[in-house]
Image (cartoon, rainbow, N blue to C red):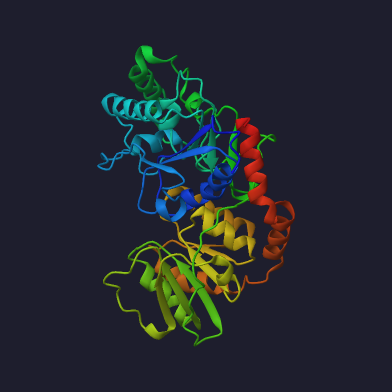
Amino acid sequence: MSRQNNNHHILYAWEWGTGFGHLSRFALLGSRLVSDGFRVTVAACDLSHVHRFFHPSIFQIRQAPTKTNLSHAPFRNPTTIAGLAYNLGYDSPDHVAVFANAWRGLIADVRPTHVVSDFGIGAAIGIRGHGIPIIQIGTGYACPPPKTPLQSMKGLTPHQGEWNLEQSMVQWVNDALSRQAEPFEFFAAILQSDPGILLSTVPELDHYQRDDQATHLGIWDHVDGRSVQWPGLRKKKVFAYLKPNPGNDALIQSVLDAGAEVAAVSLREPRNEKATKGEPLVKHQSGAVTLKSVAEECDFAITNGNHGSTLRLLSYGIPVMACPLYLEQRVTAATLERLGLGVSAALHQPHLFEEKVHAAIGMRNSPTLNDFRRNYMGQFGVEAEENAYQSLRRQLQI
């Protein structure tokens, strides 16, 4: 390990979200930083999977400030990050002050020289006035353009009142900072990374319209897992990676009715799993599986439209049926259908499942998917991790 960089201490700050995606995205970069002699601290909102990616003997692990008891959210489907922040606890002057003090306390304790912020605004508030460079990392959804008023996701119009909320929230933040730091002029300034962002997506799946200077880096996260297990009774095979939902059983049954078998994966052990008709044709399994093993035999995949697994499957040429639970997933699902890379299915509309399943089965090896796969491999391919790491080093000037 090089020792020339020991004066540099990078804080990775993950504030919002769940699952493996955020951690796995930074894990490879963090390991490279450590190998090159940098100190790295990981502050995560969810510590349940951290040790899978960051060994405590190598990385300092901290709990990121987060709110667990959320207030009633007036914006059911916020179209800007201000509305999302409100729903995730930044919903009053007092609560904003609590977050600001918690993040500033963490920054004072860790004393980083650089910050990598993953999906949140707390780290940017915490470093205000300290002169610490900060860079955003994430999918398009997690890294909205710093424009005023805040830009909505593609195809969406802000709710009435989100602009007023945006103005109120920046005032709450400035009140919390009081005389500790220079105030933010507008909410978008909180999102203004200095020097930039690491966009883990492709232009087609970016949730926002960006200027020509934006650099999309593809996907480089990697989750070690076992090979997927299939029932092995039918030729047609469908991979299902879905969060619990009342509509899942009917959807899986529609897949079975179409003559396919299913490998159903959950990150957690299934509890009280409702018996599915034709159970031998559904292989339930918990924990991570390698999507490359899925691609070897899969006819199509079903996800909730979560970005990481969806893009990875598309890069292998696998069509995706997206069954969104949240607004950003609805944007992804609509994009997949519009581009001919998959289909969008609403879990509360089971009468459409048969049509959607047959459409997805017919997409395997389509010219559109093959073109996407070739273009992805040509533009990003196996160099995505190296390009992301060099971009991180370059933008942080380390």
Residue shown at the point (31%, 79%) measured from the top left: 275
Q: Is residue 137 above or below residue 109?
A: below
- Report which quarter residue 319 is drawn in: bottom right
Left/right placement of residue 328 relative to residue 49 reads right
User: Which corner quadrant holds the C terminus?
Assistant: top right
Quick check: 190 above or below 230? above
Where residue 369 appears, as percent x and y from the top left, is 67, 64
The residue sitting at the bottom extreme is 233
Q: Quadrant of the N terminus?
A: top right
Whether residue 28 is visible here, answered yes or no, is yes
Q: Is residue 222 above or below residue 206?
A: below
Residue at x 47% of width, y 26% of height = 190
Q: Position of residue 93 (x, y in %)?
A: 29, 24
Q: Is residue 216 visible?
A: no
Tell whether 115 sits left or right of 125: right
Q: Residue at x 35, y 79 (%)?
A: 276
* Number of numbered discs on residues: 0
The picture places residue 42, in percent across and down from the top left corner, at: 44, 41
Residue 223 left/right relative to 220: left
User: Residue 66, image x and y in percent?
Assistant: 33, 38
Location of residue 370 by image quarter: bottom right
